[in-house]
Image (spheres, rainbow, N blue to C red):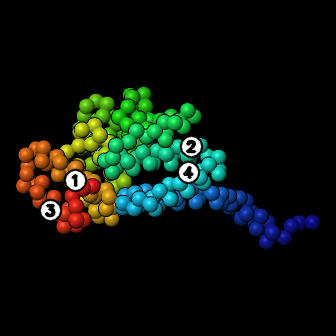
Amino acid sequence: MKRPLALLLLASMLAACGTPAPRPPEWRGVANAALADYIKQRLEGHAPAAARAYTLAQERMRDGGDLDGLHTVLLTRCAMDVALLLATDCNEFVQRNASARAEALAYHALLTGTLTQQQLAMLPERYRALGTAWLNNGPMAQAAIAISDPLSRLIASGIAARADRADDTLFAAVSDAARAQGWRAAHRAHESARIRLLDAQGRTAAAAALRARLQALYGTTAP
């Protein structure tokens, strides 16, 4: 007996559509959302909320047994310290990096100023020009400014600053972008870095104007 034409068409359509992709497990969605919230809270300067989100992201990655995901969480904390121009040794990641992927190790090396030529190709593409400039004593500030994504540019600015190779143009561009995003902590950190740089260059009038602006906005010039 021949199958009805309608059934044949239905079977053909289902085969063409394929099997729907499985939904990601709940723990991963919670972990990713918590990590995104952690970044937001750090950049805006909400320390208690950031700490809660960070802990949740770690716990959910552990729930799922995702070591690569846990490394991502730990490196994100390191990257936020760098972006906010804070001292960091990325110790949490170092303590757990025995099984880390080469890409994670390369990113850690960029954040901490220990990048090697062999690791350059392992970096996310947006950071390779910055890594090349670091390795070859090139213009890191220009490489950082050329990064289009505001968060990645902010991290790149922190990397250049740690290498003492940031300039006023970079600090100004990143500070303006942070302000536009509502990233208060990042804005204050980079404006404060600009003030220190301008003072060191003897540009006291420009430094005083920035200092007065920060004082008017936040009641303090401290980052």
Helix, strand or loop for disc 4 = helix
- Residue 215 location, x and y as percent? 19, 63
Measure how far apart labels 4 and 3 are at the Cα level: 40 Å
Q: Residues within 10 Å of mark 4 (few under 14, many from 20)?
A: many
Question: Quick one: quadrant of the N terminus?
Answer: bottom right
Q: Residue at x 57, y 34 (%)?
A: 99
Q: Residues within 10 Å of mark 3 (few under 14, many from 20)?
A: few
The answer to which of marks 1 and 3 sits earlier in the sequence is: 1
Measure how far apart labels 2 and 1 are at the Cα level: 35 Å
In the displayed orientation, state which residue is furthest to the right: 1
Three-letter code, disc 2: Asp
Three-letter code, disc 4: Gln
Q: Residue at x 65, y 46 (%)?
A: 65
Q: Examine the image and state in which quarter residue 3 appears.
A: bottom right
Which mark is in front, 4 or 2? 4
The answer to which of marks 4 and 1 sits earlier in the sequence is: 4
Measure how far apart labels 1 and 3 are at the Cα level: 11 Å
User: Which residue in the structure is indicated by mark 3?
Assistant: 212
Measure how far apart labels 2 and 3 are at the Cα level: 45 Å
Question: Quick one: quadrant of the C terminus?
Answer: bottom left
User: Which residue in the structure is indicated by mark 2?
Assistant: 68
- Residue 11 location, x and y as percent? 77, 64
